[in-house]
Image (spheres, rainbow, N blue to C red):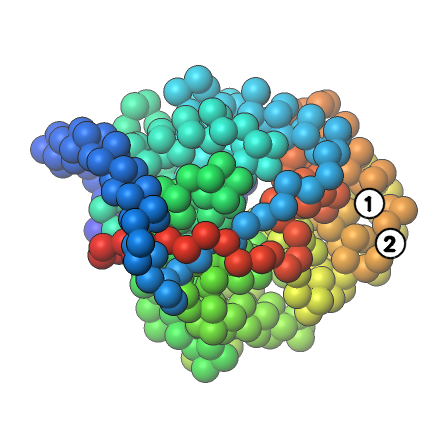
Amino acid sequence: MTAVVVPAVESGEHEWMPRRRSTRAARQRARRRRARRRALVPLVALAVVAALLLPGGAPSGQPVAVPVPAGAADPDAEAAARDFLDRYVDPDGRVIRRDQGGDTVSEGQAYAMLLAVAVGDRARFDVVWDWTREELQRRDGLLSWHWRDGRITDPEPAADADVDAAHALLIAADRFDEPRYARDALRIARAVRRLETADTPAGPVLVAGPWAAGRTLTVNPGYFDPLAFGRLGTLTGEPAWWDELTEGGYAVVDDLAEDHRFPPDWAVVIDGDAMPVPAPGSSGGSARYGLDAARLPVRFAAACDPRARHRAAALWPTLSDVAPSMHAQTSDLSGRPVTRVRHPMAAVAAAASASAAGDRDRVGPLLDAATALDRRTPSYYGAAWVALGRVLLETELLGGCPAAPGPRLPDPAGS
């Protein structure tokens, strides 16, 4: 398997991954598999409904979906979500990185799914997931991360996209009363556990993808999502293990924080010890807090666990001294800017840290600054996180804390 360096443009989370080159025969086999799956979808849906309706069809103790309250409407959040969907989602369901050459990544598909279910747009959710399943989903259930010019150009998965997609499907199963989506979420969640986690002395840890496991584990702290982990634990019927995954993530973050105020975009874990590193495949340089790591305070501030919010709040003493529109795209690990470029994601991360620290008066101006930055210099990644930031920090459109038990589902055959 050869390693190919992919130039970083906007979001740096998948700059490098081992690439397996596609062959014509493999593509033909994939098309035949997709055709067979399309033919089976109606039958599977009928089987699920029948299992739910028949007496004894939902045996006790099977995985449950976690219902999520719709939450109060928020015009700014809903407008931002619909703006992203309108600007970057094609009618066929493909999310296009228009500012990055017109390609598609699994992360973008998952973002669109989260935003579509947040605003209750069933039609858009359906088309985005259908495209994702048909074009990106691998036989093991994970999603190939990169698609361009009508084909997959890199089949390696990225763990953040897999977790976000499973989380979106889980919410959609309840929001849209569609059991099939819970089965789809369960398949991805089981594959994440099997292929995208690794054991450490501090517990299991989410690695960046299957390629990132080994004696040296490669992790992206911005992938850790305590809220999603908890809900997927309920879905899979293994809440204790997914709680351990959250604890493993906390251990990595805390280990990194012993010597550095800000989390890095990338880190390695060797024998349980975490250390920051430059992006895999980059040519030298230092570890940075950038567009990848900035997701950590947002995900942690939105979590139901006070310990996660405490970690997000730890950045606020440094970020609070910066004017809303002046948050740099990249900083060193002390929080000192290393570029004059401003980015909406950096302002959203500051808003998340302010929210976690209880400084609610600063959240709105920071989110407004992020919106203004995206309007001034539109970007796929900026628009996605302006919307996700508003939804996660200002609404319960993706769920409240805690969630109540949901409808029981029949145990799917296999993974």
Is 243 placed left or right of 57 in the picture? right
Q: For the point 45% across and 52% down, which residue is it?
A: 407
- Disc 2 is placed on an element classified as loop
Q: Is residue 68 visible in the rendered structure shown here?
A: yes
Residue 8, how many percent across, how many down?
Answer: 49, 39
Q: Amino acid at mark 2?
A: Asp
Residue 309, how many percent across, how many down?
Answer: 71, 62
Of residues 291 and 205, the one drawn nearer to the viewer in this rendering = 205
Considering only vertical position in the picture, is 382 above or below 308? above
Q: Residue reaching furthest top?
A: 91
Q: For the point 64% across and 41% down, which residue is it?
A: 70
Q: For the point 57% across and 61% down, which residue is it?
A: 226
Q: For the point 36% across and 34% down, which residue is it?
A: 132
- Disc 1 is placed on an element classified as helix
Is 296 placed left or right of 5 in the picture? right
Q: Residues within 10 Å of mark 2 (few under 14, many from 20)?
A: some
Per the image, the residue denoted by label 2 is 359
Q: Is residue 147 visible in the rendered structure shown here?
A: no
| Badge 1 vs badge 2, beta-carbon distance below 8 Å | yes
